[in-house]
Image (tube, rainbow, N blue to C red):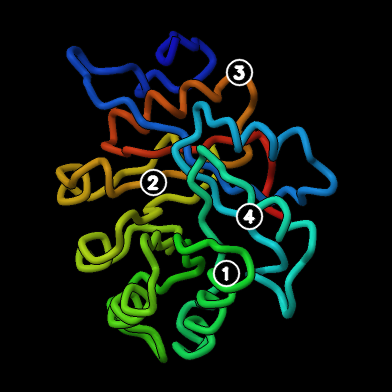
C-alpha cells in the first residue's frame, strides 16, 4: 500500500480525504554497471521506476566508459537520463552542451538531468536559454535540479524540476509556496534523504499531498 499510518512520523503527513495524486518513483541511479549488474538488469525489464539518472563520472566522463557503453546501449524499458553538472551557473553553457552531446554520442542517451541548476532564471553563464539550446542540440527531455523551490519560470521551462532535495527531518516541516502546490504534478520531483526505513512510505504520502508527481526517498545521507 502506498499510504499507511506511521505513528512515529509526523501526523501532518496523513493523506487528505479524496487524494488522487500518487507520485511515481524516479531515482538517482549512481550505481556502476560493473558493480551492480543485477540492478541494471532490472532497469532493462522495467518496473516501478518512471526514470533514473545515470552518472558515469560526475557526468559522461572524459572518455567513454566501456561498462557504461555496454549497459546504456542495451534496450531499456526504464528511461535513462544522463547527469550534467551546471555548477550553479559557474560552468559555461558550451561545457554543459558538450557534456550533453557526449551522453548522446557515446552512450545514446538523449534525456538529461541538469544538476546544481541555479534557482534563478539567470545567473552567471546560466539562463533558461541553455535548456532551449540543449533541446536544439537534440535533447528529448531536460530535467532541472536546483534542489530547492526555484522561480516559476524554471518549472514552466524544464520538463521536470526537482523542487525539493532535503533530509526527512527538514521535509516533514517544509512549507511550499501556493503557486507550486497548484502546479502540474508531472513537472515536480521531490528527493528526500536521511530517512529512517520506517518512514519511507510517509515521504510518499507527504509528496502526494504537496503535489509532487515524482519522488525518491532514501535512508542514505549526503556525503
**Alpha-carbon span between mark 2 and mark 4:** 26 Å
Disc 4 secondary structure class: helix
Closest to the observer: 151 or 58?
58
Closest to the observer: 130 or 180?
130
Quick one: label 1 or label 4, which is nearer the N terminus? 4
- Relative to 171, does residue 53 appear above or below in the rendering? below
Q: Which mark is nearer the camera, 2 or 1?
A: 1
- Relative to 166, does residue 100 appear above or below in the rendering? below
Mark 1 surroundings within 10 Å by alpha-carbon count, few (fewer than 14), some (14 through 19), many (20 or more): many
Mark 2 surroundings within 10 Å by alpha-carbon count, few (fewer than 14), some (14 through 19), many (20 or more): many
**Alpha-carbon span between mark 1 and mark 4:** 11 Å
Asked whether, in this view, residue 188 is left or right of residue 147, the answer is left
- Relative to 171, does residue 72 appear above or below in the rendering? below
The quarter of the picture where residue 142 lies is bottom left
Residue drawn 79% across and 57% down? Answer: 67
Residues at discs 2 and 1 in contact (Cβ within 8 Å):
no
In the image, residue 34 lies at what x, y percent?
83, 49
Disc 1 secondary structure class: helix
Residues at discs 4 and 3 in contact (Cβ within 8 Å):
no
Residue 189: assigned label: 2
Residue drawn 59% across and 42% down? Answer: 193
Mark 4 surroundings within 10 Å by alpha-carbon count, few (fewer than 14), some (14 through 19), many (20 or more): few
Q: Mark 4 sits on what residue?
A: 73
The quarter of the picture where residue 76 lies is top right
In the image, residue 55 lies at what x, y percent?
65, 60
In the image, residue 139 lies at what x, y percent?
39, 68
**Alpha-carbon span between mark 3 and mark 2:** 22 Å
Q: Mark 3 sits on what residue?
A: 198
Q: Mark 1 sits on what residue?
A: 103
Residue drawn 72% across and 67% down? Answer: 57
Disc 3 secondary structure class: helix
Amino acid at each position: 500500500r502506498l499510504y499507511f499510518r506511521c505513528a512515529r512520523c509526523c501526523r501532518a503527513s496523513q493523506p487528505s480525504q479524496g487524494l488522487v495524486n500518487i507520485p511515481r518513483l524516479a531515482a538517482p541511479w549512481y550505481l556502476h554497471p560493473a558493480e551492480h549488474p543485477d540492478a541494471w538488469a532490472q532497469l532493462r525489464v522495467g518496473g516501478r521506476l518512471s526514470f533514473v539518472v545515470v552518472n558515469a563520472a560526475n557526468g559522461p566522463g572524459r572518455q567513454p566508459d566501456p561498462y557504461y557503453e555496454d549497459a546504456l546501449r542495451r534496450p531499456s524499458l526504464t528511461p535513462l537520463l544522463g547527469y550534467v553538472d551546471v555548477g550553479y551557473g559557474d560552468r559555461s553553457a558550451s561545457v554543459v552542451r558538450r557534456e550533453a552531446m557526449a551522453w548522446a554520442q557515446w552512450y545514446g542517451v538523449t534525456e538529461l538531468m541538469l544538476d546544481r541548476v541555479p534557482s534563478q532564471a539567470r545567473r552567471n553563464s546560466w539562463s533558461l536559454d541553455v535548456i532551449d539550446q540543449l533541446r536544439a542540440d537534440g535533447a528529448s527531455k531536460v530535467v532541472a535540479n536546483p534542489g530547492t523551490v526555484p522561480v516559476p519560470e524554471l518549472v514552466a521551462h524544464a520538463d521536470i524540476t526537482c523542487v525539493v532535495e532535503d533530509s526527512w527531518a527538514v521535509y516533514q516541516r517544509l512549507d511550499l509556496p501556493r503557486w507550486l502546490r497548484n502546479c502540474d504534478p508531472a513537472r515536480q520531483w521531490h528527493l528526500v534523504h536521511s530517512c529512517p526505513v520506517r518512514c519511507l512510505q510517509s515521504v510518499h504520502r507527504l509528496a502526494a499531498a504537496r503535489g509532487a508527481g515524482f519522488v525518491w526517498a532514501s535512508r542514505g545521507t549526503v556525503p
